[in-house]
Image: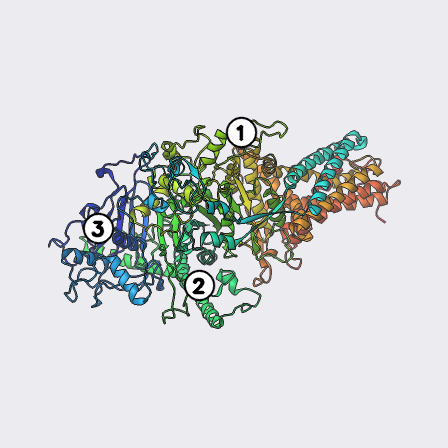
Amino acid sequence: MASNHNLRTSWSARVPAPGAEASTAASDRPMLAFSRRSKSGRYTRYSRDDLDSELGSGEISKEFLSYHVHIPPTPEHELINSAAAANPLMAARVEEQYVSNSLFTGGFNSVTRAQLMDKVIDSQANHPQMVGAKGSTCVVPGCNAKVMSDERGKDILPCECDYKICGDCFADAVQANGICPGCKEPYKATNVDEVVANAKHEESSQPQLSLPPPPAGVSKMERRLSLMKSRNYDRTLTRSQTGAFDHNRWLFETNGTYGYGNAIWPKDDGGDGEIGEPNKLLNKPWRPLTKKLNIPAAILSPYRLLVLIRMAVLGLFLAWRIRHKNEDAIWLWGMSVVCELWFSFSWLLDQLPKLCPINRSTDLSVLKEKFETPSPSNPTGKSDLPGIDVFVSTADPEKEPPLVTANTILSILAADYPVDKIACYVSDDGAALLTFEAMAEAASFSNIWVPFCRKHNIEPRNPESYFNLKRDPYKNKVRSDFVKDRRRLKREYDEFKVRINGLPDSIRRRSDAYHAREEIKAMKLQREAPRDEPVEPIKIPKATWMADGTHWPGTWSNASAEHTRGDHAGIIQVMLKPPSDEPLLGGNDQNNAFDLTGVDIRLPLLVYVSREKRPGYDHNKKAGAMNALVRASAVMSNGPFILNLDCDHYVYNSQALREGMCFMMDRDGDRICYVQFPQRFEGIDPSDRYANHNTVFFDINMRALDGLQGPVYVGTGCLFRRIALYGFDPPRVDRHGSCFPCFPRKHKSNATAAAVEETRALRMDDEDDDGTMNLSSFPKKFGNSNILIDSIPVAEFQGRPLADHPTVKNGRPPGVLAIPRDLLDASTVAEAISVISCWYEEKTEWGQRVGWIYGSVTEDVVTGYRMHNRGWRSIYCMTKRDAFHGTAPINLTDRLHQVLRWATGSVEIFFSRNNALLATPKLKFLQRIAYLNVGIYPFTSIFLIVYCFLPALSLFSGQFIVQTLNVTFLTYLLVITVTLCLLAVLEVKWSGIELEEWWRNEQFWLIGGTSAHLAAVLQGLLKVIAGIDISFTLTSKSAGDDEDDEFADLYLVKWTSLMIPPITIMMVNLIAIAVGVSRTIYSTVPQWSKLLGGVFFSFWVLVHLYPFAKGLMGRRGRTPTIVFVWSGLLAITISLLWVAIKPPSGNSQIGGSFTFP
């Protein structure tokens, strides 16, 4: 696994086996050791208990490289080293430097190792936060560690003689005699804090204010919460059943003094147990962060009236159809009536949730005033916004190009949100070295891209999209150096793309070179060995090698044991270490690409994660990868909010995160489980042939659901509340009665029950009715990670709205989050490796109730449904500037397979316990109907296909669905059609979409309903009844002529079995029109009414299928041969079948009584 020539540093921590109990004894605590390999290939290892021993005993040769690593004090592990105990901040900073430059690997029943990465890419890393950043080395003999450096990457030298010394050697020198090894003079500063302060003082004459170190004996959770002790010292603080301090109960059961804006404010007279409100707080004007904008009544009232009218007309029409049978063709009448009944029911399910559409708006100025403006509770004006962990998921670099993923990461790193409050986690479910190095290249390029965006206020902050803008890039740019900076950055980005696109060849050439070297070395050893036995040919597995000359622990290009897509260790690499809490302003140095004076050059935390995979485990695809990120992020950063994005969806609006946070931090925001943003797509053909923009769903259906209990979760562009993903109930739950609103369910309404509902913050349905939180059951729900369990109440507290007014319930005091975050340590990252192992979810509720839900290909819809079913509500955030942009398939076959996956997930939902018919009373009635429609809509395809064949059957048989085309039938048909058109016009009016987009959606509804939806129903029924899983794959391809065309993929024809039903419908209706016209023209008694009825409905079918037919033609009419073959076979088969079923009467000739002229 390791190379034989590179130096390497490794930490290791033993991961317990599944079900192992955590012991508090010192002998059972996790082993954390440090080792360094010398050039001779031997190791020197030191355990935590040896940190206080002297290393220069003479037994260790000077050729070995060794160093101390001091573990910061935590409640579980106390420091033994006296120097580190006296200065814990120094130890924490030193350890974070090594942790942030190490690749952690591990998994089930294996050792968690941390390999020091001298470099992760072939190019040089310049930013000081990036892994592998270059710096000076310690000149103490026997040590080549990096010297201490500040946030800018500049060396911090403790002595005036500028003797370069690392933090470990400096601590040893201070502990020994306090004399500099270089000039032999005593150090003026004897700890790292003084040295750093002196270095900052030399750079700036302004006084530097530093936060005091945390008091001794304070746990990590208490430092994160920054809670003040109560003045009532005689009151006993409650503890949870596990013995840990219960911050949640303490907040509401004590009169803690928080300062201005306290949620529980003691009276001025100091009376014990009496709660009061300060006069200033009561009189302070309160400004909301969001506003609800109702649809104008001039539009909404006629819309609702038309819905009622159409419902009444449909009822009368169906009653008339049932009473007036067509005795001449009872089979035709029966099929049509059944289909019309189902269509009316399906329309009702789709229309009822649209009765209450609303719009929303946010006020970012109020957000800045409340959370980032100096106040009595936050004198420094540091950001009091909660943290956000952003998840980016990718699985295959061949299908998801690394350049696209890198651009998404760059847009996240440049988002307009406090740098120290955002963390980006990239899940690589394929464990590909290509994705790993592409991420490292993106981290390196962010050194110049992110400051450029902040300096010139660039939008969008995706470099590929920004440099491809078709508008004037210099418009509204007032800085004189913008043109020069942009040209310089454009050249840098072109070089960046060359490096990204060249990574596959670079990795292959590097791996071939190292493999050849290993073969030569093995052959040399074989020749030197005695040859008593016959020589066997040398077989060395061809590994994939990293830039530092070591084996890649993930998937190899040439599959090998424990290095395949389904069998590899868990990997975590901190690409960009956590930034400092103070702004780091750039300058006009020669090392910078351009002038960054006054620009904050800090970068957010960036972490690469690849969960462990082993044979025999069900890894649950994307949902399992997302749950692994939830656990890893909870251990490392624990942001109370989570934003998930697909690798091809980037941040188009840099303030989108602030827009979503307005809803979460507003009054009653603690009851919001997620904020869903609409999906907007790029690269769609101008005509949007296959309704790829899906604007009817995102701008009409989702906006209408926002007026109920909230929109459904659609898989990407969603800002979650972390505790909602953990399966907890909202603080205050509304019960909306049973399935039928006429029989509401009775519930508690007394003051005591209301008080319990308001004060409980973490509760699940299976807990006691008194609102208590049973912490002893958490290991069974969340696993045996104590750090993960301890982070839950912290995330809940930090995610509460600001208690800046008495009307805000379940709030947190202002200013408590304006504190620096904790430093990373080795035990934290080792715990993160443990929680992403393949065994961690065994015998827990992950995927069943906690996190993303398993068991469906549309895990997003099920996950959102579970939250709504627990009483949470969601918000639909439509920003003036689109929040996120992504890509969508414009090819017909790809689009059909996408719809097939969605429809298959809906069928699975219908046949599972997630069916809305089984929902709890916490789900609103109309919201229940919306979720019921999600599971039922694919079944409409059965009736739709039958109805598409009815016009052809009518023309073939000479009959119609009614006895005669009388005035009553035509009147009903006219009213139904007109009301549908008027409803469409009003929907277009209040949603803001174009009428053409509505029509494209109608066309693709029939295309998808006759192809992908039918296949999904068949696949779901076979899976549920017989357990047979069917997949529809591509069989043949035909490409367009111009491959350089932006929309060349639109004309690419890929044959798939999903195309058979629509092709059959088109051919049958065309043949039927020809047969019907011929029969009527040459008939003795022409029946024009039946012909017109059949031709009209056939024409209706063909018009809806026109985009499908156009897609089969390809570019300029070049149609694949398979289309003509299938068309001819279907036409001949249907003609012969019809002649066999109903031979011509009174004439033995085929064709009946007419002949061609």
Could you tell me the amino acid type at mark 3? Ala
Q: Position of residue 405 (x, y in %)?
A: 46, 55
Tell me, for residue 749, which label it has, or none.
1
Foreground mark, 2 or 1?
Answer: 1
Q: Is residue 497 visible?
A: yes
Q: Nearer the viewer, mark 3 or mark 1?
A: 1
Looking at this view, is 402 or 974 the one in front? 974
Please indicate whether residue 339 sits to the left or right of residue 568 in the image. right
Residue depth check, mark 2 versus mark 3: number of the one nearer the observer: 3
Residue receiving disc 2: 449
Q: Name the side, left or right, on which 1126 lies relative to 46.
A: right
The residue where tag 3 is placed is: 86
Percent coordinates x, y for residue 759 in the rendering: 45, 35
Q: Position of residue 31 (x, y in %)?
A: 24, 43
Element under disc 1: loop
**Which tag, 2 or 1, sits closer to the chain's start?**
2
Given residues 873 and 861, the one toward you in this image is 873
Structural distance between the alpha carbons of marks 2 and 3: 41 Å
Which mark is first along the chain, 1 or 3?
3
Q: Earlier in the sequence, mark 2 or mark 3?
A: 3
